[in-house]
């Protein structure tokens, strides 16, 4: 199949949830804006997509949307060296300290809207004529090759593709013979289960499976019906994947960055300096 221009594939990122399981951080900001390594986890996610050529992002906002708005509306000013003439408000930019050639759409999709309705509402306004689109959550990181997943999505010709991940177990596992424990494995590196890794690709034919009704949950009827129709493929990934759902998850991601061992960052990239 011919090469596809990934810059034409909109990436819808779910940024509107309440983040109740990590309330110590989300009382004053939405979960995607929680910093790791000095930058919001949302920026880490967007940067990973951009590594493969994706550059059009639609942020499906809800809870504390003003925090995301402020961050991106002031992104240029916050990432430049500049001189400001206070008398005439003349701004002279000396140096821009980023190279992101991105288009970011800030789409408010409702305070209490569920995931499927967020995608439906934002897509109804901003999908345009795109044949394919991506969807992901604002709290998951991976080192998966997203260009390879998209290529597999196109090759297989189904409406949807989900990244299937095989994360290590958080708990020790028994190996048993009847009631006798024959071995104990403390947090095995690879579990036997495949779960939703949250990095999706869809054709626009997925839109009828969604509803703008705020109760529409992406992971419920839309994906269940898509699977029942034989239109959902899995792209398996055995590499790194993590979801920042709790304080413990956040601390583990921070440690990976501080140790220089974050798989989603260029080798040796230090944490961002903060003031």
Image (cartoon, rainbow, N blue to C red):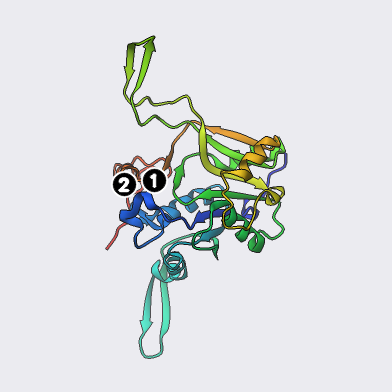
Residue 71: give x, y in percent of width and height: 42, 66
Residue 190 located left or right of residue 161: left
Give the answer, above or below, for where 131 lies relative to 71: above
Task: Specify the farthest residue to the bottom.
Answer: 87
Name the quarter where the C terminus is drawn. Answer: bottom left
The residue depicted at 46 percent of the width and 33 percent of the height is 239
Tell me the element at label 2: helix
Q: How many numbered circles does the render carry?
A: 2
- Determine which of the numbered discs, if any, sits on residue 71 in the image: none
Visible residue check, residue 38: no
Name the quarter where the N terminus is drawn. Answer: top right
Residue 217: give x, y in percent of width and height: 56, 49
Tell me the element at label 1: loop
Residue 189: give x, y in percent of width and height: 39, 26
Kindly identify which residue carries mark 2. 247
- Determine which of the numbered discs, if any, sits on residue 245 in the image: 1
**Contact (CB < 8 A) between labels 1 and 2?**
no
The residue depicted at 68 percent of the width and 52 percent of the height is 207
Alpha carbons under labels 1 and 2: distance apart: 7 Å
Location of residue 173 by image quarter: top left
């Amino acid at each position: 199949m011919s090469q596809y221009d990934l810059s034409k594939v909109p990436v819808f990122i779910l940024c509107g949830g309440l983040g109740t399981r990590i309330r110590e951080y989300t009382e004053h900001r939405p979960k995607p804006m929680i910093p790791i390594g000095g930058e919001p986890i949302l920026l880490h996610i967007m940067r990973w997509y951009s590594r493969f050529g994706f550059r059009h992002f639609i942020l499906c906002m809800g809870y504390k949307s003003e925090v995301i708005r402020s961050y991106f509306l002031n992104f240029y000013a916050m990432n430049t060296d500049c001189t400001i003439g206070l008398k005439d408000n003349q701004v002279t930019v000396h140096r821009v300290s980023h190279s992101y050639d991105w288009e970011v759409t800030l789409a408010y999709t409702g305070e209490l809207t569920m995931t499927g309705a967020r995608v439906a509402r934002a897509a109804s306004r901003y999908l345009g004529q795109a044949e394919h689109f991506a969807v992901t959550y604002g709290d998951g990181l991976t080192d998966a090759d997203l260009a390879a997943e998209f290529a597999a999505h196109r090759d297989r010709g189904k409406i949807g593709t989900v990244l299937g991940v095989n994360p290590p177990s958080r708990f020790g596992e028994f190996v048993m013979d009847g009631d006798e424990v024959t071995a104990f494995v403390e947090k095995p590196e690879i579990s036997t289960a495949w779960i939703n890794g949250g990095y999706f690709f869809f054709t626009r034919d997925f839109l009828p499976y969604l509803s703008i009704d705020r109760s529409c949950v992406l992971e419920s009827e839309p994906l269940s019906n898509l699977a029942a129709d034989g239109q959902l493929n899995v792209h398996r990934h055995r590499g790194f994947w993590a979801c920042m759902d709790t304080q413990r998850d956040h601390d583990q991601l921070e440690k990976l960055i501080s140790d220089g061992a974050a798989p989603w960052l260029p080798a040796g990239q230090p944490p961002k300096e903060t003031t």
